Structure formats: structure tokens, C-alpha cells
Image (cartoon, helix red, strand yellow):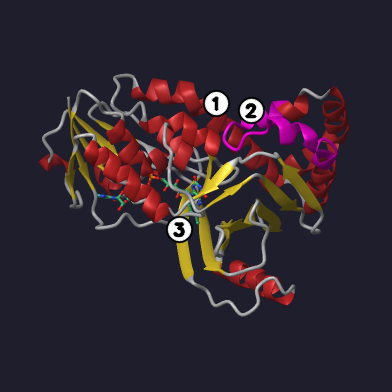
Amino acid sequence: MNISIIGAGPAGCITALNSKGHDVILYEEHRKQPVQCAGLISISGLKRLGIRPEFLNKVRGARIYSPSKRLIEIDARKDKAYVVDRQEFDEELLNSAIDSGIEFVNEGVKDINKLKADRIVLATGTNYQLHRKLGLETPGEFLLGAQYELKADCDPDFVELHFNVPQFFSWIIPTGDYCRVGLCTRENPTPWLEEFVKELRRDGRIKNSRILKRNYGIIPLYDPNIRTDYGRIITVGDSAGHVKATTGGGVVMGGLASRHACKKDYEKLWRAEIGRELWLHLILRRFLDNLSNKNIERLFSLVNEYKESLEKKGDMDIASRSLSSLLMNPSFTFRLLLNSPRFLMDLL
Ligand SMILES: Cc1cc2nc3c(=O)[nH]c(=O)nc-3n(C[C@H](O)[C@H](O)[C@H](O)COP(=O)(O)OP(=O)(O)OC[C@H]3O[C@@H](n4cnc5c(N)ncnc54)[C@H](O)[C@@H]3O)c2cc1C
């Protein structure tokens, strides 16, 4: 088959890397792929994708702060995720794809009618211009992300998640030399991020550091009903909303879907592999979105008591594994059921 892939982000490059036996042209409109990313990628996810990237740092757990700043520390006691330089990560993937024998064209595609391909893979990230032109479905809901890179006092072995913004969280990710401090919201994220950075300065965690880099981007929320296969044209990665709604992470899920992009039953295959997990992440997001701060505190207390299960069996990508590690514990499930009328009141 002649395949044209549009977009050389992770989804486009992983599609190219899994296109053995086909004639492939990969198009990218930028000289260097533009990145908006915290660069946190699970080691287990990368293993599933068969990628061994260069990384800046490794983390083994998370310090999670409730709205009232109560702390849960999840310490897996082994490396769980890499912190990567996304620009380098994308470049490495592109170079491997080129080395595998595909043709690379450093040009944007504005009109797919000019492409003589049996299959066209739209891996255009959150640029939905071609989707609109062609009448293809796009994700319907988005988070708005903002992130600053600066020097701050943080433990290199742990990421921090602060539940201090409505319907999402802020993060601090240690790269080794500096930190990525960011967050997502449903409205303009910048005032929230400025406030968070001010708080970190007040707490003495950011001393004299200026902001080294500013990063802004949008994150699509997964839509279980989205159509991604139109016969000659298919969509993958952010372009198809292959993103975990709990964390906004899309590199692993988009990558897993992309491995099927050159196969006949693409939509059936990606849904079989990651559809249920993406749906579970979405259900968890909806649940957390609707919970009052009081009930988030209750949930924190409960999870804190049973965090050992998460430490042993939790997985950043596989929501069902993390959930079942908690629910397999009868006493956790009993306590959750006891609290469920309170949670239900928020959801109704
Ligand atoms: C603030 C923020 C933090 C994030 N943090 C994380 C994280 O820590 N971990 C994680 O896993 N995910 C994270 N994500 C999500 C992650 O960045 C995306 O899910 C991922 O980049 C999606 O990969 P992709 O290949 O689908 O799209 P992209 O990486 O966006 O790549 C799309 C490519 O297509 C090119 N392109 C677009 N249109 C055309 C065209 N017409 N012709 C040619 N080329 C075109 C673009 O130039 C681009 O290079 C974050 C996102 C944001 C906004």
C-alpha cells in the first residue's frame, strides 16, 4: 500500500515505524516538530511501544496534594517514568523512522487531493484544519495547558500533583537541572499558573529563578464515539483524541493506536487494545470533575489508607490496573460504598 502520513509527532513517527512492507511518505510542516509537553512518559508504556529514548531524569513516585494541601506520597520504590526532552524525543523518533527507509518530506499538507496514496494517516496533533476541510470528526472537549520551566526546589525522584485548580491539577516535574511547573484548566490557564508560581516563590521553593521557557497547548479529551476510520483516511494520536482524560498524557496511548494505523481493521484494533482504558480514564475524569472539594478530601483520606496497593500495582496508563488494585481490597470497597451516597450527591 502507498501510505501518506501527515504530521511527524510521536503518532506520525510511530505509524511510520510500524509500516513495514508499505511505501510510506511522512510529511511535517515544521523544521523541528513544535512541542507542548511536560515530557513525563511511563517506562512500561515505552516498553510496550518498543521505544528506548534518551531521558533527562527518572521518577519513582508522586506526591499528591489535596485542595487543603494534605499529602499522599505514592512511592513505587522503582523507576516508573522518564522525564524527556520532547523536542529530542520527537527528533529521535523521526530519525529512526527515516532510518527504517520511509521517505520524509519537510512540507505542510494543505490539500490531501494532491496525495496519491491508498491510505492517508492524519497525525496532525491538535491542528484540526484538515479535519474541518474534509468534514471529519474532531474531539469535542479540550483542556488548556500552560507550563513554565524554571529552577525550583524539588525532589528529583518524585513528581508533584497539586489539586489546586478547578477540574484538573497542577504539576511539578523535576528534569534534574530545572522543573516544569504547569497546569490545565477549562479557561485561561495563565492566571492560575502565575498564582501557583507566586505561591512557590512565597514558600521559598523558587528563589531567584527567572522563567526559562513558557509553553502553552491544548489537550483533547477522549470521545469514545469519535470516528477515526473513513476508509482511505484515518486519524491517530491527538488528532483522534487518543489521550488519557485523567492526566492529559497522549504519547503512549496515541503511540499504541498508531501501531495499528497501517492495518486493515485499524479502528477495531485500536479500540480492542486501548478503548476500554481510555473510556475508564474518561469516567474517572468525569467523576473527579463533579466532586466537591470536601469529597475530594474524603477520597484522598481513603486512598491514603490503602495507598500500598497503588504503590505495588498502580500503572500510569492502565487505569483498570490502578483501580482494581484498590477495589480488590474488600475493606477499601466497603469504605468506598459507605461514602458513595455523599459522592452520588455531587454527581446528581
Ligand atoms: C501542556 C501539555 C503538557 C503535556 N504533557 C504530557 C506528558 O507529560 N506526557 C504525555 O504523554 N503527554 C503530554 N501531553 C500531550 C502530548 O503532548 C500529546 O498527546 C502528543 O504530543 C500527541 O502526539 P501527536 O503525534 O498526536 O501530535 P503532535 O505531537 O502535536 O504532532 C503533530 C505534528 O503534526 C504536524 N502537522 C500538523 N498539521 C500538519 C500538516 N497539515 N502538514 C504537515 N504537518 C502537520 C505538527 O507540526 C506536529 O509536528 C501534554 C500536552 C500539553 C498541552
Rendering quarter of residue 255: top left
Left or right of 313 in this view: 148: left
Q: Which residue is drawn at 59% across and 56% down?
A: 173
Tell me the quadrant of the picture where the C terminus can be found: top right
Marks 3 and 2, how far apart at CA:
28 Å
On the image, numbered disc 3 is attached to which residue? 217
Magenta highlight: main SS = helix
| Structural distance between the alpha carbons of marks 2 and 1 | 9 Å
Q: Where 195 falls versus 110 (above or below)?
A: below
- Left or right placement of residue 132 versus residue 332 in this view: left
Circle number at residue 320:
2
Amino acid carrying label 1: it is: Arg
Q: Position of residue 67 (x, y in %)?
A: 77, 57
Q: Earlier in the sequence, mark 2 or mark 1?
A: 1
- Splitting the image into 4 quarters, where does residue 114 fall? top left
Q: Are marks 1 and 3 in contact (CB under 8 Å)?
A: no
Up the image or down, 301 lies above or below 30; here it is above
**Label 3 element class:** strand
Around disc 2, counting alpha carbons within 10 Å, would you say few (fewer than 14), some (14 to 19), or many (20 or more)? some
Element at label 1: helix
In the rendered view, tell whether residue 222 sits above or below residue 264: below
Report the amino acid beneath label 3.
Answer: Gly
Q: Which stretch did the figure color magenta?
A: 302-324
- Return the x and y of residue 16 as percentages of the image width and height: 27, 35
Q: Can residue 5 be seen in this view?
A: no
Label 1 neighbour load within 10 Å: few <14, some 14-19, many 20+: some
Side (left or right) of 97 relative to 346:
left
Quarter of the figure that contains the N terminus: top left
* Label 3 beta carbon within 8 A of ligand 1: yes
Q: Is residue 264 visible?
A: yes
Q: Which residue is drawn at 79% across and 38% down?
A: 307
Q: Are marks 2 and 1 in contact (CB under 8 Å)?
A: yes
